[in-house]
Image: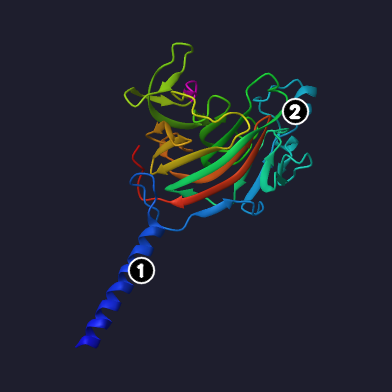
Amino acid sequence: MKQLNRITILSLIIIFILVACKRSNTENTAGNAVSTEWPEVLYDGNGMDNWNIYLSAPWSYFEENGYQIMDPINKAEHLGWNNDPYGVFSEIEKDGQKMIRISGEVYGAMISKQEFENYHLRLVFKWGTLKWPPRMEENLDCGLLYHSVGKPGVGHNAWMRSNEFQIEEGHCGDFYPVAGMINTIPAIPDTASRFYIYSPDGEEVTFGGDNWWCKVPGNFENPAGEWDTLDLYTFGEKSMHVVNGHLVMRLLNSRHMNNEGIEEAVTSGKIQIQSEAAEVFIKYAGIEKIIGLPDF
C-alpha cells in the first residue's frame, strides 16, 4: 500500500511538471494573447534564408526619365527578385553582433517566404545615419508591412498591397494603407493637417484611397542609435501596433477590393520590411501564433 502511494504521488508530481512546462511554453506575457506553438524566428543573426528581396529601379533611373518615385514605371526596369547589385539588404557584424543592414539606397523590401495569420510579430531595429534621394531632407523612414498580398512593385514600384506599421522617426506605429488596402480605425481629426490621429474614444474612420494616414497619439521611440522594439498583434481582421510596450494604434477591419470590386477581408499574408531611402539595422524578427489579442 505504501509502495502504491509512492507511485501515485510520483505520478502526480510528473503530471504536474508536464502541465506546468506545457503552460510555460504556451503562455504569452502580454495580456490574454496565448501562443499555440513555439515562436518562429525569422531573423536572429541566423542569415537571410527566410526572406526574398524585391527591388524597384535605382533613383538614377527616375531622375534621368523625369519620374517621381510614385509614378508607375515599366516593371522591366525594376531590379526585381533577389537581384541586389547595390547591396541594399545584407547581413553584417557590428559591435560583435550579427544584424541585417538595410542601406535604403533603392526602394524595395525583404519579403518573408511564408504567409502568416493570427500572430504576434516582434521586430527589434535601430536607425543608421545614411539618407538617400528622394528623401534627403525627410525623416529616416522604413516600414513593417503585413497581410501582404498580390504582386510586389505595386506600391511606389516597390511593395505588395499591405497594411503598414510605419517605422519613421517620430512616427513609429502610424498606419498607411499600401496599394489599395483598407482599414477602419477609431480616430480624431488632426488639427494640423487633413488627416487623423488614433484615439480609442474616436469615431470609426475608414482609411484607404485619398484618406491614407492615421497618426500615433504620441512618440514612444528611444533616442537615436538605441534599439526599439515593435510588436504587431493581428488576429482575424483586427490588429494592434505597439512601440516599446505602448499601444499606439488599434485597427478594426483589414480588407481590400477584390477583382470583382467587392470588399473582402484580408487576414493573412506575407511580411515585408521596407527599404525607403534610409539606413536601418534589424537584429531580431520573430513570430508566434496567438488565439486572441492582448489586453492593454
Q: Is residue 36 magenta?
A: no
Snapshot quadrant of residue 186: top left
Let me know if residue 179 appears in the view. no
Which residue of the protein is positioned furthest toward the front in this rendering?
Answer: 2
Q: Residue at x 43, y 58 (%)?
A: 37
Question: Closer to the observer: label 1 or label 2?
Answer: 1
Left or right: 111, with 209 as reference point: right
Span shown in magenta: 209-214
Q: Secondary structure at mark 2?
A: helix
Q: Say which amino acid is labelled 2.
A: Trp
Q: Is residue 213 magenta?
A: yes
Q: Position of residue 92 (x, y in %)?
A: 72, 46
Of the 4 image quadrants, the one containing the N terminus is: bottom left
Q: Say which amino acid is labelled 1.
A: Leu
The label number, if any, that marks residue 59 in the structure image: 2
Of the 4 image quadrants, the one containing the C terminus is: top left
The label number, if any, that marks residue 18 in the structure image: 1
Q: Residues within 10 Å of mark 1 (few under 14, many from 20)?
A: few
Q: Separation of disc 1 and disc 2 at Cα?
A: 57 Å
Q: Position of residue 90 (x, y in %)?
A: 72, 45
**56 or 244: nearer the eye?**
244
Snapshot quadrant of residue 54: top right
N-terminal-most mark, 1 or 2: 1
Establish if 169 lies above or below 151: above
Q: Position of residue 291 (x, y in %)?
A: 36, 50
Q: Residue at x 51, y 40 (%)?
A: 146
